Image: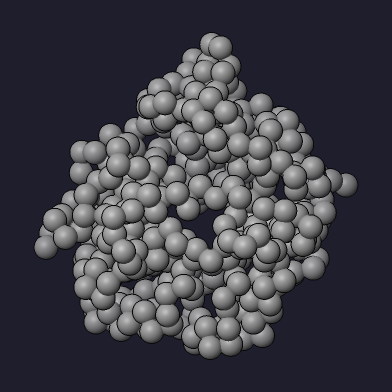
Amino acid sequence: MNYEVFSSPLYVMTKPIGARCNLACKYCYYLDKQELYREEKEHVMSDETLELFIRQYIEAQTTPNILFTWHGGETFMRPLSFYQRALQLQQRYGAGRQIDNCIQTNGTLITPEWARFLHDNHWLVGVSIDGPQEFHDEYRRNKAGRPSWAKVMHGIDMLNKYDVEWNAMAVVNDYNADYPLDFYRFFRDELGCRFLQFTPIVETTTPQTLSPESVTPQQWGTFLCAIFDEWVHRDVGEMFVQLFDATLANWMGVTPGVCSMARDCGHAGVMEWNGDVYSCDHFVTSQHRLGNIRQHTLYQLMKGEQQQRFSTIKSAALPTQCHECQWLFACHGECPKNRIVDADTHAICTDNLGFTPRLNYLCQGYQQFFQHAAPYMDFMKQELMAGRPASNVQLLNK
């Protein structure tokens, strides 16, 4: 097959267990996606679909390095044999190319057998944990309402014991947002985590009502500024915080590694357990279903007209306030899923999400953060452009 050259690798995150999970986190945006397949019984990826996905995914890549990302639901609810089979198929169709795997998990099901597999095959693991026990257990509980923090920590202990590379992925909500330094220092000092990604909760219970777990714009701005001050004064070059890295990338005019802060959408699709492909993990709806890999290849779906139209929503659906904002270059309006504020009335409105010009709910918080971080971002940009390390920002602190 002859494919046009991608400016970046084709990226499709796959969900071998769909939305099924052993936890019932109160703020989870994905659990209700099971309703899309209510008439189906298993919600589990078959061997046939797995092989078709791996073959198409490898064929569609034009770069020598290929990354597979396994997501959920809870990925470890599939047996270890499923992922062993995935490795066999990657080897069969990879034709000697460099193939890497990363997997996202809530950490509660990690056993020595799992940890040994992850280590031996060099898988990167993303562990969802929302900070210290009090913060984490506030919303991350199982279906019986029991807390999950102790099991997550046991899972992390297993990863450390078997020397598995892992990163932390945390949610910032209405509760832990009020304790930014306790949150940050837990990951740095207690877990020894060097790579931290945190995501603000912005969810609605009705088209006009925010969920009670959602962080406020004021909380978000104060949270970011407090952690940034701690990070920039002592941890630059030692602790890698995804949002700060993405902000610096935009400051330098470089495409950031996280799509929410990039200029355009549409880079990362998602495939459900049955081969259905959607535009984005946050837009898994019938409206944004691109098709199924049994009828069309991943390449055709991700490069098709529907996905190309989706990729324009970040720039095409910006209100006047965004175009006039001095910080537009730093966030590009952030994720369309958070653009839920009417630009005139300031009311919450989620109809035609992403395609109607609206303000980002977190806009005030981001503006506060960009204003606060600007002198340091300017300095780090200057250092990097001169070929010096960004960690020289410590000189500015003095």
Numbered disc total? 0
Q: Quadrant of residue 381?
A: top right
Look at 37% across and 74% down and name the residue there. 99
Compared to residue 77, the image places residue 313 above or below, namely above
Compared to residue 357, the image places residue 163 above or below, namely below
Of 375 and 353, the residue lying toward us: 353
Look at 53% across and 88% down and name the residue there. 113
Specify whether 132 is left or right of 158: right
- Kindly give the residue lying farthest to the left in the view shown: 1
Q: Quadrant of residue 234?
A: bottom right
Q: Position of residue 87 (x, y in %)?
A: 35, 81
Q: Position of residue 84 (x, y in %)?
A: 37, 83
Compared to residue 284, the image places residue 117 above or below, namely below
- Kindly give the residue lying farthest to the right in the view shown: 398
Look at 64% across and 82% down and name the residue there. 158
Can residue 375 be seen?
Answer: no
